[in-house]
Image (tube, helix red, strand yellow):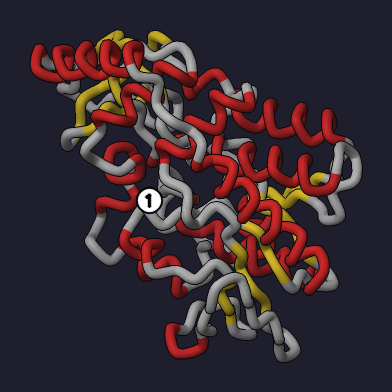
Amino acid sequence: MTTQQSSFAMNARNTYEKHTLSNAHLDALEEETIFILREVAAAFERPALLFSGGKDSLVMLKCAEKAFGVGRIPYPLLMIDTGHNFPEVTAFRDFRAEQLGAELIVRSVEDSMKRGTVRLARPDESRNVHQSVTLLEAIEEFRFDALIGGARRDEEKARAKERIFSHRDSFGQWQPKSQRPELWNLFNTRLHPGEHFRVFPISNWTELDVWQYIAREQIALPSLYYAHTREVIERKGLLVPVTHMTPAKPGEQVQQRLVRFRTVGDITCTCPVESDATTANDIVIETLQADVSERGATRMDDQTSDASMEKRKKEGYF
């Protein structure tokens, strides 16, 4: 962290301590999310909630708990496992699902590889992009007609123009001309056979909203979200974690840094940021000074081209 950033963080912390940041708007966001979650339960026959164990899906799960009650969530939780997920996240995913008494369905990219529907160009290739194949196979297997996801419009420009109820064709693809108008809180949920919806209840939330809500509701998260010491290497402006899947290359210097993850995805493409934040309130302060989106700051797969996310959206990624 530079001297200028440290100074800014100190000023932000002093301002935060003198004037507590208002979270009154969180009630309206929570109410909207609960309304959408209930609308999905009422409008669709076989919905599921995409649950990775990350902060956004945990916020949605908290809202679902408020909407329906513990042990009464009316749809299963679905997770697409690349086999390259952080173990802390998958362990927390299992713990939280069991805690709520929710049905958890896990489908693996490795199973798709065994079936031959996913083929890697090389053994160390990121499997993140191949999740869409396994997801579409799960949709066909369980005949899901709606999948609830934690995408937010502030994350990335391809998501900024997304509807809350996003129509997908019989191939699972996003077609811009097939999207329905959304007026106030009226949603057109009619489907033809083979089609489905992706539903994004927290579309209107920002990263700051999410962390304020986590702080207010005291939502437990995987430890990776908070500051910890980790071996990293600097590569293309990012801090790449040193793991058996992402080893240091010849000539790269391994460093011990105090870091945290703003988003947790596939190990092969998710990077931490320097941080000393150990609580949700600390992260609220950090988020106030952030000038790069969480995906822009931490995801190598989104930096391959300006259209990376747009291409994957059309293929059924989210």
Query: What residue lies at 56% left-to-right and 48% top-to-bottom?
Result: 29
Q: Can residue 116 be seen in this view?
A: no
Q: Mark 1 points at which residue?
A: 155
The residue at 71%/86% (across/down) is 190
Q: Which of 270/54 is in front? A: 54
Q: Which amino acid does label 1 sit on?
A: Glu
**In the image, 138: left or right of 133?**
right
- The foreground one among 81 and 38 is 38
Residue 6 point in image, percent of width and height = 17, 13
Residue shown at the point (75%, 30%) measured from the top left: 96
Q: Can residue 53 be seen in this view?
A: yes
- Tell me if residue 163 comes above or below residue 87 in the rendering: below
Give the answer, above or below, for where 130 lies relative to 104: below
Report helix, strand or loop for mark 1: loop
- Residue 295 is left or right of residue 172, and the answer is left
**Apparent side of residue 67 relative to residue 159 in the rendered image (left or right):** right
* Residue, far left: 4
